[in-house]
Amino acid sequence: MGILIVLAIVAVVLFWLIGAYNGLIALKNRVLNAWKQIDVQLKRRHDLIPNLIETVKGAMSFERQTLEAVISARNAAIGAQGVAATAKAEGELTQALGRLFALSESYPDLKATGNVAQLQEELSSTENKIAFARQLYNDEATLYNTKQMQFPTNMVAGMASATPAELWEIEDAAERAVPKVDFGFKPPAA
Amino acid sequence: MTDSNLFEQQAKNRRRSAWLTAGFVVFTAWVGFGGDLGIYLATKDAQEGYRHVVPIIGLVLSLLAGTIAWRSWAHGAEQVLRAAAASELVEPATPEQARLVNVVEEMAIASGLPKPRVWIVPDSDPNAFATGKDPTSAHVAVTEGLLATLDRDELQGVVAHEMAHIRNYDIRLMTLLAAMIGAILIASDLMRNFIRYGGRLGRPGSSRGGGKKGGNPLALVVLGIWLLTLIVAPLVTRLLAMSVSRKREFLADATGAQFTRNPMALASALEKLEAAVGATRSIAKGAAHMCIVDPGQRVLGGKAGFRGLGSHPPISERLARLRAMSFLPNRSPAVLSE
Protein backbone atom coordinates (compact mmCIF):
# COMPACT_ATOMS: atom_id res chain seq x y z
CA MET A 1 0.00 0.00 0.00
CA GLY A 2 2.75 2.41 1.01
CA ILE A 3 4.65 1.66 -2.16
CA LEU A 4 1.57 2.42 -4.22
CA ILE A 5 1.16 5.83 -2.59
CA VAL A 6 4.82 6.66 -3.19
CA LEU A 7 4.50 5.52 -6.79
CA ALA A 8 1.40 7.67 -7.26
CA ILE A 9 3.18 10.72 -5.85
CA VAL A 10 6.19 10.09 -8.07
CA ALA A 11 3.91 9.73 -11.09
CA VAL A 12 2.11 13.01 -10.30
CA VAL A 13 5.41 14.85 -9.85
CA LEU A 14 6.75 13.34 -13.06
CA PHE A 15 3.68 14.37 -15.04
CA TRP A 16 3.88 17.86 -13.63
CA LEU A 17 7.56 18.07 -14.56
CA ILE A 18 6.86 17.00 -18.13
CA GLY A 19 3.97 19.44 -18.41
CA ALA A 20 5.90 22.38 -16.97
CA TYR A 21 8.95 21.62 -19.11
CA ASN A 22 6.94 21.33 -22.32
CA GLY A 23 4.98 24.45 -21.44
CA LEU A 24 8.18 26.44 -21.11
CA ILE A 25 9.56 25.09 -24.37
CA ALA A 26 6.32 25.96 -26.17
CA LEU A 27 6.43 29.50 -24.80
CA LYS A 28 10.09 29.87 -25.75
CA ASN A 29 9.31 28.90 -29.33
CA ARG A 30 6.43 31.34 -29.41
CA VAL A 31 8.82 34.10 -28.35
CA LEU A 32 11.25 33.10 -31.10
CA ASN A 33 8.44 32.98 -33.63
CA ALA A 34 7.22 36.41 -32.60
CA TRP A 35 10.75 37.72 -33.04
CA LYS A 36 10.84 36.26 -36.54
CA GLN A 37 7.64 38.15 -37.31
CA ILE A 38 9.34 41.42 -36.41
CA ASP A 39 12.29 40.45 -38.54
CA VAL A 40 10.15 39.85 -41.62
CA GLN A 41 8.55 43.28 -41.29
CA LEU A 42 11.85 45.05 -40.64
CA LYS A 43 13.28 43.55 -43.81
CA ARG A 44 10.22 44.69 -45.73
CA ARG A 45 10.68 48.21 -44.44
CA HIS A 46 14.35 48.20 -45.42
CA ASP A 47 13.37 47.06 -48.92
CA LEU A 48 10.74 49.76 -49.33
CA ILE A 49 12.97 52.69 -48.44
CA PRO A 50 15.13 52.75 -51.63
CA ASN A 51 11.87 52.92 -53.65
CA LEU A 52 10.69 55.84 -51.58
CA ILE A 53 13.97 57.72 -51.92
CA GLU A 54 13.95 57.13 -55.67
CA THR A 55 10.43 58.53 -55.96
CA VAL A 56 10.89 61.67 -53.90
CA LYS A 57 14.50 62.41 -54.91
CA GLY A 58 13.58 64.57 -57.90
CA ALA A 59 11.11 66.83 -56.16
CA MET A 60 12.93 67.04 -52.85
CA SER A 61 16.52 67.29 -54.01
CA PHE A 62 17.25 70.28 -51.79
CA GLU A 63 16.22 68.29 -48.73
CA ARG A 64 19.43 66.31 -49.13
CA GLN A 65 20.12 66.12 -45.42
CA THR A 66 16.79 64.53 -44.61
CA LEU A 67 17.13 62.01 -47.42
CA GLU A 68 20.64 61.10 -46.39
CA ALA A 69 19.57 60.74 -42.77
CA VAL A 70 16.97 58.20 -43.86
CA ILE A 71 19.48 56.28 -45.96
CA SER A 72 22.10 56.14 -43.24
CA ALA A 73 19.52 55.21 -40.60
CA ARG A 74 18.38 52.40 -42.87
CA ASN A 75 21.90 51.10 -43.35
CA ALA A 76 22.54 51.26 -39.61
CA ALA A 77 19.31 49.37 -38.96
CA ILE A 78 20.25 46.62 -41.42
CA GLY A 79 23.53 46.07 -39.60
CA ALA A 80 22.07 46.07 -36.09
CA GLN A 81 22.36 42.90 -33.99
CA GLY A 82 20.40 41.85 -30.91
CA VAL A 83 17.15 43.13 -29.46
CA ALA A 84 18.36 46.36 -27.82
CA ALA A 85 20.58 47.49 -30.71
CA THR A 86 17.92 46.67 -33.31
CA ALA A 87 15.29 48.50 -31.29
CA LYS A 88 17.50 51.59 -31.10
CA ALA A 89 18.47 51.61 -34.79
CA GLU A 90 14.88 51.02 -35.92
CA GLY A 91 13.67 53.76 -33.62
CA GLU A 92 16.05 56.19 -35.30
CA LEU A 93 14.91 55.05 -38.73
CA THR A 94 11.30 55.63 -37.70
CA GLN A 95 12.15 59.18 -36.66
CA ALA A 96 14.07 59.88 -39.88
CA LEU A 97 11.12 58.61 -41.93
CA GLY A 98 8.74 60.71 -39.87
CA ARG A 99 10.76 63.86 -40.67
CA LEU A 100 10.79 62.93 -44.36
CA PHE A 101 7.01 62.50 -44.49
CA ALA A 102 6.48 65.69 -42.51
CA LEU A 103 8.61 67.58 -45.05
CA SER A 104 6.86 65.96 -48.01
CA GLU A 105 3.62 67.58 -46.81
CA SER A 106 4.97 70.90 -48.09
CA TYR A 107 5.40 69.53 -51.63
CA PRO A 108 1.86 69.41 -53.03
CA ASP A 109 3.01 68.17 -56.44
CA LEU A 110 4.59 65.14 -54.73
CA LYS A 111 1.31 64.22 -53.09
CA ALA A 112 -0.54 64.73 -56.35
CA THR A 113 1.39 62.02 -58.21
CA GLY A 114 -0.30 59.35 -56.15
CA ASN A 115 2.82 57.26 -56.23
CA VAL A 116 4.05 58.81 -53.02
CA ALA A 117 0.68 58.39 -51.35
CA GLN A 118 0.78 54.72 -52.26
CA LEU A 119 4.32 54.32 -50.96
CA GLN A 120 3.38 56.20 -47.82
CA GLU A 121 0.47 53.81 -47.22
CA GLU A 122 2.82 50.86 -47.74
CA LEU A 123 5.41 52.29 -45.39
CA SER A 124 2.97 53.33 -42.70
CA SER A 125 1.36 49.90 -42.91
CA THR A 126 4.80 48.37 -42.51
CA GLU A 127 5.42 50.65 -39.52
CA ASN A 128 2.14 49.41 -38.06
CA LYS A 129 3.10 45.83 -38.73
CA ILE A 130 6.41 46.37 -36.96
CA ALA A 131 4.59 47.94 -34.04
CA PHE A 132 2.10 45.07 -33.81
CA ALA A 133 4.79 42.44 -34.23
CA ARG A 134 6.71 44.18 -31.44
CA GLN A 135 3.56 44.22 -29.31
CA LEU A 136 3.08 40.49 -29.89
CA TYR A 137 6.76 39.83 -29.18
CA ASN A 138 6.65 41.79 -25.93
CA ASP A 139 3.44 40.05 -24.86
CA GLU A 140 4.84 36.60 -25.58
CA ALA A 141 8.18 37.46 -23.98
CA THR A 142 6.42 38.76 -20.85
CA LEU A 143 4.33 35.61 -20.64
CA TYR A 144 7.48 33.51 -21.01
CA ASN A 145 9.44 35.54 -18.46
CA THR A 146 6.62 35.46 -15.93
CA LYS A 147 6.16 31.73 -16.32
CA GLN A 148 9.81 30.88 -15.81
CA MET A 149 10.13 33.08 -12.72
CA GLN A 150 6.93 31.97 -11.01
CA PHE A 151 6.93 29.26 -8.41
CA PRO A 152 6.91 26.31 -8.97
CA THR A 153 7.75 26.49 -12.67
CA ASN A 154 11.00 28.31 -11.83
CA MET A 155 12.39 24.98 -10.58
CA VAL A 156 12.16 23.58 -14.11
CA ALA A 157 13.46 26.74 -15.80
CA GLY A 158 17.08 25.62 -15.52
CA MET A 159 16.26 22.25 -17.02
CA ALA A 160 14.50 23.86 -20.00
CA SER A 161 17.45 26.31 -20.22
CA ALA A 162 14.91 29.13 -20.02
CA THR A 163 16.40 32.58 -19.61
CA PRO A 164 14.36 35.77 -19.56
CA ALA A 165 13.74 37.17 -23.02
CA GLU A 166 14.70 40.78 -23.60
CA LEU A 167 11.76 43.09 -24.16
CA TRP A 168 11.73 45.50 -27.11
CA GLU A 169 12.00 48.90 -25.48
CA ILE A 170 10.05 51.58 -27.26
CA GLU A 171 12.31 54.18 -28.86
CA ASP A 172 15.43 55.82 -27.54
CA ALA A 173 16.35 53.18 -25.03
CA ALA A 174 19.76 54.86 -24.84
CA GLU A 175 18.43 58.30 -24.03
CA ARG A 176 16.49 57.15 -21.05
CA ALA A 177 19.69 55.68 -19.63
CA VAL A 178 18.18 52.42 -18.57
CA PRO A 179 20.81 50.35 -16.78
CA LYS A 180 22.03 47.70 -19.19
CA VAL A 181 20.90 44.28 -18.04
CA ASP A 182 21.98 41.31 -20.08
CA PHE A 183 19.98 38.22 -19.28
CA GLY A 184 21.83 36.29 -21.93
CA PHE A 185 18.81 35.73 -24.13
CA LYS A 186 19.96 35.94 -27.71
CA PRO A 187 17.34 35.97 -30.40
CA PRO A 188 18.47 34.61 -33.75
CA ALA A 189 20.64 37.17 -35.53
CA ALA A 190 18.75 39.52 -37.83
CA MET B 1 -7.09 37.97 -21.71
CA THR B 2 -4.76 35.45 -20.20
CA ASP B 3 -3.89 32.27 -22.00
CA SER B 4 -6.00 29.96 -19.86
CA ASN B 5 -9.07 32.14 -20.49
CA LEU B 6 -8.42 31.98 -24.22
CA PHE B 7 -8.12 28.20 -24.26
CA GLU B 8 -11.25 27.94 -22.14
CA GLN B 9 -13.14 30.12 -24.61
CA GLN B 10 -11.85 28.12 -27.58
CA ALA B 11 -12.71 24.82 -25.93
CA LYS B 12 -16.17 26.10 -25.05
CA ASN B 13 -16.80 27.12 -28.65
CA ARG B 14 -15.57 23.79 -29.99
CA ARG B 15 -17.84 21.96 -27.55
CA ARG B 16 -20.82 24.13 -28.41
CA SER B 17 -20.21 23.52 -32.12
CA ALA B 18 -20.31 19.77 -31.58
CA TRP B 19 -23.47 20.02 -29.45
CA LEU B 20 -25.13 22.23 -32.02
CA THR B 21 -24.42 19.74 -34.79
CA ALA B 22 -25.70 16.83 -32.72
CA GLY B 23 -28.79 18.79 -31.69
CA PHE B 24 -29.51 19.68 -35.28
CA VAL B 25 -29.35 16.08 -36.47
CA VAL B 26 -31.45 14.82 -33.54
CA PHE B 27 -34.02 17.56 -34.06
CA THR B 28 -34.41 16.83 -37.76
CA ALA B 29 -34.68 13.11 -37.08
CA TRP B 30 -37.39 13.89 -34.52
CA VAL B 31 -39.27 16.00 -37.04
CA GLY B 32 -39.12 13.15 -39.54
CA PHE B 33 -40.04 10.24 -37.28
CA GLY B 34 -42.72 12.33 -35.56
CA GLY B 35 -44.31 12.88 -38.96
CA ASP B 36 -44.14 9.16 -39.63
CA LEU B 37 -45.90 8.51 -36.33
CA GLY B 38 -48.67 10.91 -37.26
CA ILE B 39 -49.30 9.31 -40.60
CA TYR B 40 -49.04 5.89 -39.04
CA LEU B 41 -51.75 6.81 -36.54
CA ALA B 42 -53.94 8.26 -39.26
CA THR B 43 -53.66 5.21 -41.50
CA LYS B 44 -53.27 2.42 -38.99
CA ASP B 45 -56.94 1.41 -38.91
CA ALA B 46 -57.46 1.68 -42.62
CA GLN B 47 -58.94 -1.58 -43.87
CA GLU B 48 -57.84 -1.11 -47.44
CA GLY B 49 -55.36 1.22 -49.18
CA TYR B 50 -52.08 2.63 -47.88
CA ARG B 51 -50.82 1.93 -44.39
CA HIS B 52 -47.75 3.86 -43.28
CA VAL B 53 -45.58 1.27 -41.57
CA VAL B 54 -42.05 2.03 -42.73
CA PRO B 55 -40.87 5.36 -41.21
CA ILE B 56 -39.64 6.56 -44.57
CA ILE B 57 -39.81 10.31 -43.83
CA GLY B 58 -37.74 9.91 -40.68
CA LEU B 59 -35.10 7.90 -42.50
CA VAL B 60 -34.90 10.34 -45.39
CA LEU B 61 -34.78 13.41 -43.14
CA SER B 62 -32.13 11.89 -40.85
CA LEU B 63 -29.98 11.16 -43.85
CA LEU B 64 -30.61 14.67 -45.14
CA ALA B 65 -29.73 16.22 -41.77
CA GLY B 66 -26.51 14.25 -41.67
CA THR B 67 -25.63 15.50 -45.14
CA ILE B 68 -26.50 19.11 -44.29
CA ALA B 69 -24.51 18.94 -41.05
CA TRP B 70 -21.52 17.54 -42.91
CA ARG B 71 -21.82 20.17 -45.63
CA SER B 72 -22.14 22.97 -43.08
CA TRP B 73 -19.02 21.68 -41.39
CA ALA B 74 -17.00 21.31 -44.58
CA HIS B 75 -18.38 24.14 -46.73
CA GLY B 76 -20.32 26.39 -44.33
CA ALA B 77 -17.98 29.33 -44.88
CA GLU B 78 -18.29 29.13 -48.67
CA GLN B 79 -22.07 28.93 -48.36
CA VAL B 80 -22.21 32.02 -46.17
CA LEU B 81 -19.89 33.95 -48.49
CA ARG B 82 -21.81 32.86 -51.58
CA ALA B 83 -25.11 33.86 -49.98
CA ALA B 84 -23.68 37.34 -49.39
CA ALA B 85 -22.45 37.46 -53.03
CA ALA B 86 -18.95 38.22 -51.71
CA SER B 87 -15.99 38.25 -54.08
CA GLU B 88 -12.48 37.53 -52.95
CA LEU B 89 -10.00 40.38 -52.89
CA VAL B 90 -6.77 39.01 -54.34
CA GLU B 91 -5.26 41.89 -56.27
CA PRO B 92 -6.31 45.20 -54.67
CA ALA B 93 -7.46 47.55 -57.42
CA THR B 94 -8.15 50.75 -55.49
CA PRO B 95 -6.23 52.51 -52.69
CA GLU B 96 -9.06 51.60 -50.30
CA GLN B 97 -8.73 47.92 -51.13
CA ALA B 98 -4.95 48.07 -50.72
CA ARG B 99 -5.51 49.68 -47.34
CA LEU B 100 -7.91 46.90 -46.35
CA VAL B 101 -5.41 44.20 -47.27
CA ASN B 102 -2.72 46.01 -45.29
CA VAL B 103 -4.96 46.41 -42.27
CA VAL B 104 -5.88 42.71 -42.34
CA GLU B 105 -2.19 41.81 -42.50
CA GLU B 106 -1.46 44.14 -39.58
CA MET B 107 -4.18 42.56 -37.46
CA ALA B 108 -3.06 39.06 -38.39
CA ILE B 109 0.34 39.98 -36.98
CA ALA B 110 -1.10 41.59 -33.87
CA SER B 111 -3.21 38.52 -33.12
CA GLY B 112 -0.42 36.10 -34.05
CA LEU B 113 -2.72 34.26 -36.47
CA PRO B 114 -2.27 33.37 -40.14
CA LYS B 115 -3.67 35.98 -42.52
CA PRO B 116 -7.31 35.21 -43.34
CA ARG B 117 -8.69 35.49 -46.88
CA VAL B 118 -10.31 38.85 -47.59
CA TRP B 119 -13.71 39.25 -49.24
CA ILE B 120 -15.72 42.24 -50.40
CA VAL B 121 -19.52 42.26 -50.21
CA PRO B 122 -21.11 44.50 -52.84
CA ASP B 123 -23.37 46.46 -50.49
CA SER B 124 -23.33 50.16 -49.74
CA ASP B 125 -24.34 49.68 -46.10
CA PRO B 126 -21.29 49.40 -43.80
CA ASN B 127 -20.94 45.99 -42.15
CA ALA B 128 -18.42 43.17 -41.69
CA PHE B 129 -18.26 39.53 -40.66
CA ALA B 130 -15.82 36.67 -40.29
CA THR B 131 -16.43 33.03 -41.13
CA GLY B 132 -14.56 29.75 -41.43
CA LYS B 133 -13.84 26.54 -39.58
CA ASP B 134 -10.68 27.47 -37.70
CA PRO B 135 -7.97 30.17 -37.73
CA THR B 136 -6.03 28.47 -40.53
CA SER B 137 -8.98 28.56 -42.94
CA ALA B 138 -10.70 31.79 -41.97
CA HIS B 139 -12.32 34.54 -44.02
CA VAL B 140 -12.98 38.18 -43.28
CA ALA B 141 -15.64 39.92 -45.37
CA VAL B 142 -16.45 43.63 -45.38
CA THR B 143 -18.98 45.58 -47.40
CA GLU B 144 -18.04 48.25 -49.92
CA GLY B 145 -19.90 50.69 -47.71
CA LEU B 146 -17.57 49.92 -44.82
CA LEU B 147 -14.49 50.76 -46.90
CA ALA B 148 -16.06 54.03 -47.97
CA THR B 149 -17.26 55.06 -44.50
CA LEU B 150 -14.40 54.31 -42.12
CA ASP B 151 -10.95 55.84 -41.79
CA ARG B 152 -7.85 53.72 -41.35
CA ASP B 153 -7.93 53.44 -37.55
CA GLU B 154 -11.63 52.61 -37.50
CA LEU B 155 -11.18 49.97 -40.19
CA GLN B 156 -8.39 48.53 -38.07
CA GLY B 157 -10.72 48.37 -35.08
CA VAL B 158 -13.36 46.50 -37.07
CA VAL B 159 -10.87 44.04 -38.57
CA ALA B 160 -9.39 43.46 -35.10
CA HIS B 161 -12.89 42.64 -33.83
CA GLU B 162 -13.24 40.07 -36.61
CA MET B 163 -9.79 38.61 -35.90
CA ALA B 164 -10.92 38.19 -32.29
CA HIS B 165 -13.90 36.12 -33.48
CA ILE B 166 -11.47 34.01 -35.51
CA ARG B 167 -9.06 33.47 -32.63
CA ASN B 168 -11.83 32.53 -30.18
CA TYR B 169 -13.28 29.96 -32.61
CA ASP B 170 -16.52 31.96 -32.62
CA ILE B 171 -16.47 31.65 -36.40
CA ARG B 172 -16.93 27.88 -36.31
CA LEU B 173 -20.00 28.08 -34.07
CA MET B 174 -21.46 31.07 -35.91
CA THR B 175 -20.95 29.53 -39.35
CA LEU B 176 -22.54 26.23 -38.32
CA LEU B 177 -25.43 28.16 -36.83
CA ALA B 178 -25.90 30.16 -40.01
CA ALA B 179 -25.89 27.08 -42.22
CA MET B 180 -28.22 25.13 -39.94
CA ILE B 181 -30.65 27.95 -39.19
CA GLY B 182 -31.19 28.18 -42.92
CA ALA B 183 -31.84 24.44 -43.17
CA ILE B 184 -34.21 24.42 -40.16
CA LEU B 185 -36.21 27.35 -41.50
CA ILE B 186 -36.69 25.60 -44.84
CA ALA B 187 -37.43 22.23 -43.22
CA SER B 188 -40.03 23.54 -40.78
CA ASP B 189 -41.70 25.46 -43.60
CA LEU B 190 -41.87 22.27 -45.65
CA MET B 191 -43.25 20.25 -42.76
CA ARG B 192 -45.93 22.81 -41.99
CA ASN B 193 -47.12 22.70 -45.58
CA PHE B 194 -46.99 18.94 -45.39
CA ILE B 195 -49.22 18.89 -42.28
CA ARG B 196 -51.77 21.09 -43.98
CA TYR B 197 -51.77 18.78 -46.98
CA GLY B 198 -51.54 15.62 -44.91
CA GLY B 199 -54.36 16.78 -42.63
CA ARG B 200 -56.76 16.91 -45.56
CA LEU B 201 -55.62 13.50 -46.72
CA GLY B 202 -55.85 11.88 -43.30
CA ARG B 203 -59.33 13.15 -42.36
CA PRO B 204 -61.41 10.34 -43.92
CA GLY B 205 -59.19 7.75 -42.26
CA SER B 206 -59.34 9.32 -38.84
CA SER B 207 -63.10 9.76 -38.87
CA ARG B 208 -63.42 6.11 -39.65
CA GLY B 209 -60.89 5.30 -36.93
CA GLY B 210 -62.71 7.57 -34.47
CA GLY B 211 -65.69 5.27 -34.59
CA LYS B 212 -63.52 2.45 -33.39
CA LYS B 213 -62.05 4.60 -30.56
CA GLY B 214 -58.63 4.21 -32.17
CA GLY B 215 -55.53 6.14 -31.15
CA ASN B 216 -53.08 5.33 -28.43
CA PRO B 217 -53.19 8.31 -25.98
CA LEU B 218 -49.41 8.23 -25.52
CA ALA B 219 -48.92 8.46 -29.28
CA LEU B 220 -51.28 11.44 -29.36
CA VAL B 221 -49.27 13.21 -26.64
CA VAL B 222 -46.10 12.58 -28.62
CA LEU B 223 -47.83 13.96 -31.67
CA GLY B 224 -48.82 17.09 -29.74
CA ILE B 225 -45.25 17.68 -28.64
CA TRP B 226 -44.12 17.08 -32.19
CA LEU B 227 -46.47 19.75 -33.54
CA LEU B 228 -45.29 22.17 -30.86
CA THR B 229 -41.62 21.67 -31.73
CA LEU B 230 -42.38 22.37 -35.37
CA ILE B 231 -44.02 25.67 -34.49
CA VAL B 232 -41.39 26.70 -31.97
CA ALA B 233 -38.28 25.48 -33.81
CA PRO B 234 -37.62 28.50 -36.06
CA LEU B 235 -38.08 30.86 -33.12
CA VAL B 236 -35.82 28.81 -30.85
CA THR B 237 -33.00 28.59 -33.39
CA ARG B 238 -33.19 32.35 -33.99
CA LEU B 239 -33.11 33.03 -30.24
CA LEU B 240 -30.22 30.61 -29.87
CA ALA B 241 -28.24 32.43 -32.54
CA MET B 242 -28.95 35.74 -30.85
CA SER B 243 -27.96 34.65 -27.37
CA VAL B 244 -24.83 32.98 -28.72
CA SER B 245 -23.72 36.11 -30.51
CA ARG B 246 -24.63 38.73 -27.88
CA LYS B 247 -22.03 37.69 -25.32
CA ARG B 248 -19.42 37.04 -27.98
CA GLU B 249 -19.69 40.57 -29.35
CA PHE B 250 -18.56 42.07 -26.04
CA LEU B 251 -15.69 39.63 -25.85
CA ALA B 252 -14.63 40.28 -29.44
CA ASP B 253 -14.74 44.04 -28.82
CA ALA B 254 -12.44 43.59 -25.84
CA THR B 255 -10.05 41.20 -27.59
CA GLY B 256 -9.98 43.43 -30.66
CA ALA B 257 -9.06 46.38 -28.48
CA GLN B 258 -6.27 44.26 -27.05
CA PHE B 259 -4.92 43.78 -30.59
CA THR B 260 -5.04 47.44 -31.60
CA ARG B 261 -4.55 48.93 -28.11
CA ASN B 262 -6.93 51.55 -29.39
CA PRO B 263 -10.47 50.90 -28.13
CA MET B 264 -11.68 54.34 -29.16
CA ALA B 265 -11.10 53.60 -32.87
CA LEU B 266 -13.53 50.68 -32.69
CA ALA B 267 -15.93 52.82 -30.65
CA SER B 268 -16.00 55.52 -33.30
CA ALA B 269 -16.37 52.87 -36.02
CA LEU B 270 -19.37 51.42 -34.19
CA GLU B 271 -20.87 54.87 -33.90
CA LYS B 272 -20.54 55.34 -37.65
CA LEU B 273 -22.04 51.92 -38.36
CA GLU B 274 -24.90 52.71 -36.01
CA ALA B 275 -25.52 56.01 -37.74
CA ALA B 276 -25.96 54.25 -41.10
CA VAL B 277 -29.64 53.47 -40.71
CA GLY B 278 -30.07 51.38 -43.87
CA ALA B 279 -30.19 47.61 -43.87
CA THR B 280 -27.40 45.41 -45.20
CA ARG B 281 -29.50 43.70 -47.82
CA SER B 282 -26.81 41.34 -49.08
CA ILE B 283 -26.72 39.53 -45.78
CA ALA B 284 -29.46 36.97 -45.25
CA LYS B 285 -31.43 36.87 -42.01
CA GLY B 286 -29.87 33.53 -41.14
CA ALA B 287 -26.42 35.14 -41.02
CA ALA B 288 -27.38 38.24 -39.04
CA HIS B 289 -25.69 37.00 -35.88
CA MET B 290 -22.31 36.89 -37.68
CA CYS B 291 -22.07 40.60 -38.44
CA ILE B 292 -20.33 43.27 -36.38
CA VAL B 293 -23.59 45.23 -36.20
CA ASP B 294 -27.09 43.94 -36.81
CA PRO B 295 -27.64 44.01 -40.59
CA GLY B 296 -31.37 44.66 -40.14
CA GLN B 297 -32.90 48.14 -40.06
CA ARG B 298 -31.16 49.81 -37.17
CA VAL B 299 -34.14 51.67 -35.82
CA LEU B 300 -34.51 49.94 -32.49
CA GLY B 301 -30.77 49.93 -31.87
CA GLY B 302 -29.59 51.21 -28.55
CA LYS B 303 -32.99 51.19 -26.89
CA ALA B 304 -32.66 49.33 -23.63
CA GLY B 305 -36.19 47.90 -23.86
CA PHE B 306 -35.20 45.78 -26.83
CA ARG B 307 -32.08 44.41 -25.20
CA GLY B 308 -33.30 40.83 -25.03
CA LEU B 309 -34.45 40.75 -28.62
CA GLY B 310 -31.55 41.80 -30.81
CA SER B 311 -28.88 39.48 -32.13
CA HIS B 312 -26.43 42.12 -30.95
CA PRO B 313 -26.04 44.01 -27.69
CA PRO B 314 -27.10 47.65 -27.94
CA ILE B 315 -24.34 49.77 -29.44
CA SER B 316 -24.56 52.21 -26.53
CA GLU B 317 -23.52 49.47 -24.13
CA ARG B 318 -20.64 48.33 -26.34
CA LEU B 319 -19.48 51.94 -26.59
CA ALA B 320 -19.64 52.33 -22.83
CA ARG B 321 -17.44 49.30 -22.33
CA LEU B 322 -14.92 50.44 -24.94
CA ARG B 323 -14.76 53.88 -23.30
CA ALA B 324 -14.16 52.25 -19.96
CA MET B 325 -11.21 50.40 -21.51
CA SER B 326 -9.60 53.67 -22.52
CA PHE B 327 -10.35 55.22 -19.12
CA LEU B 328 -12.76 57.77 -20.54
CA PRO B 329 -15.75 58.95 -18.55
CA ASN B 330 -18.97 57.26 -19.53
CA ARG B 331 -21.97 59.16 -20.59
CA SER B 332 -24.25 56.25 -19.86
CA PRO B 333 -24.13 54.17 -16.67
CA ALA B 334 -24.64 50.93 -18.55
CA VAL B 335 -21.18 49.45 -18.10
CA LEU B 336 -21.94 47.24 -15.16
CA SER B 337 -25.30 45.96 -16.26
CA GLU B 338 -25.85 42.52 -17.79
Image (cartoon, coloured by chain):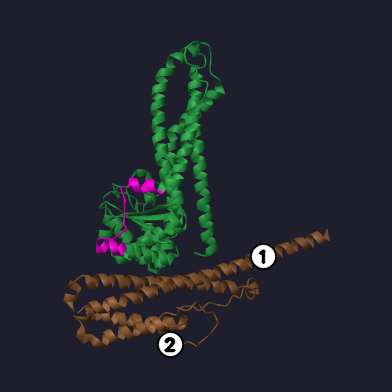
Locate residue B327, reporting x and y percent. 40, 69
Chain coloured green: B
Q: The brown chain is which one?
A: A
The verdict on residue A85 being magenta is no
- Residue stretch in magenta: B77-100
Outermost residue on the left side: it is A109
Q: In this view, does A20 lie above or below A165?
A: above
Circle 1 chain:
A
Q: What element carries label 1?
A: helix
> Quadrant of the rendered structure where residue A133 is?
bottom left
Label 1 close to label 2 by CB (< 8 Å):
no
Residues indicated by labels 1 and 2 sit on the same polypeptide chain: yes
Mark 2, residue position: A174
- Judge by depth and name the residue closer to the eye, A66 or B253: A66
B124 displayed left or right of A140: left
Outermost residue, right side: A1
- Compared to residue B53, the image places residue A91 above or below, namely below
Give residue B238's position: percent from left, percent from top. Answer: 41, 42
Give the residue type at disc 1: Trp
**What's the amino acid at mark 2?**
Ala
Residue position for label 1: A16
Q: Where is residue B105 in the image (x, y as percent from the top left)?
A: 37, 64
Across and down, in percent, residue B280 comes to 29, 49
Is residue B88 found inside the magenta-colored segment of the image?
yes
Chain letter belonging to callout 2 = A
Between the C-alphas of marks 1 and 2, the distance is 42 Å
**Which residue does the image show at 59% across and 75% down from the upper left?**
A162
Q: Which is nearer the N-term, disc 1 or disc 2?
A: 1
Seen at 58% across and 71% down, the residue is A147
Q: In this view, does B126 lie above or below A66?
A: above
Q: In this view, does B104 lie to the left or right of A63?
A: right
